[in-house]
Image (cartoon, rainbow, N blue to C red):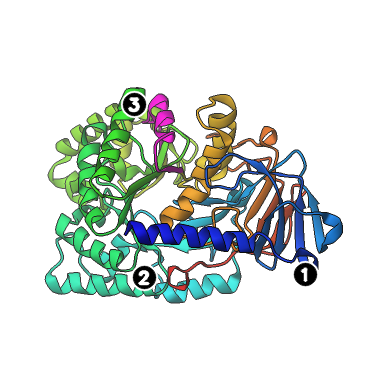
Amino acid sequence: MVVYRTLFVLASIFIGLVISKPALAQDTWDWHISGGTVVDGSGRESYEADILISGDQISFVGEVDPDTIRVQNRVDASDHIVSPGFIDPHAHGNPLETPEFRNFLAMGVTTVVLGQDGSSPSVGSLDAWCAKVADIRPAVNIAVLSGHGSIRNKAGVGKKYPTERELQEMEQLLKADLAAGAFGMSTGLEYVPGLYAGQEELEQLAEVVGAEDGIIMSHMRSEDDAEIEASLDELAGPGKYTDVHVSHLKVVYGKGADRAGEILDYMEGFRKRGIRISADLYPYSASYTGIGIVFPDWAKTNEEWKNALLERPEALRSYLTDKVARRNGPAAILFGSGKYAGRTLKEAARQQGLSPVDLLLEMGPRSASAAHFVMDQELQDHLVTGNRVMISSDGSPTMRHPRGYGSFAKVIRYYVKEKEMLSLEEAIHKMSGLPARTVGLTGRGTIASGHKADLLIFNPEKVGDRATFENPHREAEGFDWIMINGQVVREGGTFRDKRRGRVLSKSLR
């Protein structure tokens, strides 16, 4: 194995040398980007280089004499950073409804991974959905995962362990999604119906994913401080068969840098045992999810909630009272949808003349989503620095949480410039090369000859996130020149009309 890897590295170096010295004067290039400081997404130190682009690909990275080449378009990137477009490994949104995805583009994101938390497109086959998205031409590149919960629903499993026949049907549905180009499978084990899945089911499906060199990206069983290790242990089971990934890594109720270090060390322990585990996180101390997160497992659906109100109301009241208190109280729950959007649970309850728990009993678990201020900033800050921990937004164009509009810009503003916890090279690696390698997006995520021309030109001093919890849909600033698949989509801060994204397929690597 070592010999094969050595030969592969030597061959790659040789090919790179050949590609890096083309007969420049004999060709006409579409774009010449000159004078910029290249941060190539690999994590290596920045360097000065020119970039030549032909069609949708980077054709040359190195020193160019502009008087010796023919080029259609020139860009002077002096005093600016040239980097790969960012890749959001955990995003949400419906490209059939909001194909512009302006929130992502404005913060430098050129590729998003959808189908998260166990839920993938449920209308028709994944193959047909991808064809529809390709027809409307989204503004960003889109990769998709097969949702475990969606598969469960299609197989009619419901709230139980699947029979052998049902599990075989789930396997076939998963295989069909992978054949359609899905990059792996997502799970939502804290949500219905994923919370009813057992270890044998998850590992059997992991074998299917592993056979196609895919990844399992998991919203784990619990993110509570006392249960995070057990949730990681559960994820390590499928990790025996394929790469596994923790979605939006967080430790609810946990405190401090030392606790962050314990979690990162725990994950490193899996890697030493051969489990290929990674994680993403967003740079905010408030999560965003359905209000059902504070309801017990026996009252997660509307039917269960109504039954609980009739059969065990005091038990439900007691559970909600304790859960809300442990999650920092009713003022720490800010509704982002439903009739109380923009108000905290405390404010909404006061408006209705009810106690916070009485309002929740009246609303039910499926009535709204909310931002939940339950994380410790110091802990989350130190998780960002972890090995194989990358940046995501877990956001969408419509979600009332600033992470969908600010995450990637905030990393540069907060972690690079203000806190100095990451170098610019480290931050860009966590937002481009690392997610590309983790998800399996070959030919993207780094600036290299032969890779797709998804590029940003920006001044880091001018990059900033503008979205707040009060105004969550304010676009980020500073990424004024953006290219996707060799086509400029933003120049001088102005977006162009045409959308240049593509539907990416694992099966067409």
Of the pair 242 and 34, the residue shown nearer to us: 34
Of the pair 346 and 172, the residue shown nearer to us: 172
170 lies above or below 399: below
Q: CA distance from mark 1 to mark 2?
A: 39 Å
Residue position for label 2? 178
Of the pair 18 and 44, the residue shown nearer to us: 18
Residue position for label 1? 27
Q: CA distance from mark 1 to mark 3?
A: 63 Å
Q: Position of residue 268 (x, y in %)?
A: 30, 39
Q: Residues within 10 Å of mark 2 (few under 14, many from 20)?
A: many
Q: If the image is split into quadrants, where does the N terminus sit?
A: bottom left
Q: Residue at x 81, y 60 (%)?
A: 73
Q: Earlier in the sequence, mark 2 or mark 3?
A: 2
499 lies above or below 199: below
Q: Quadrant of the rendered structure where residue 29 is?
A: bottom right
Residue position for label 3? 328
In front: label 2 or label 3: 2
Q: Which residues are magenta?
A: 371-390
Image side of residue 378 versus residue 406, left or right: left
Task: Confirm whether the magenta stretch covers residue 373.
Answer: yes
Do residues under tags 2 and 3 come within 8 Å of each other at their CB atoms? Answer: no
Tell me the element at label 1. Answer: loop
Do residues under tags 1 and 2 come within 8 Å of each other at their CB atoms? Answer: no
- On residue 369, the disc is none
| Amino acid on which the number 1 mark rests in the picture | Asp
| Amino acid on which the number 2 mark rests in the picture | Leu
288 lies above or below 447: above
Tell me the element at label 2. Answer: helix
Is residue 325 in view?
yes
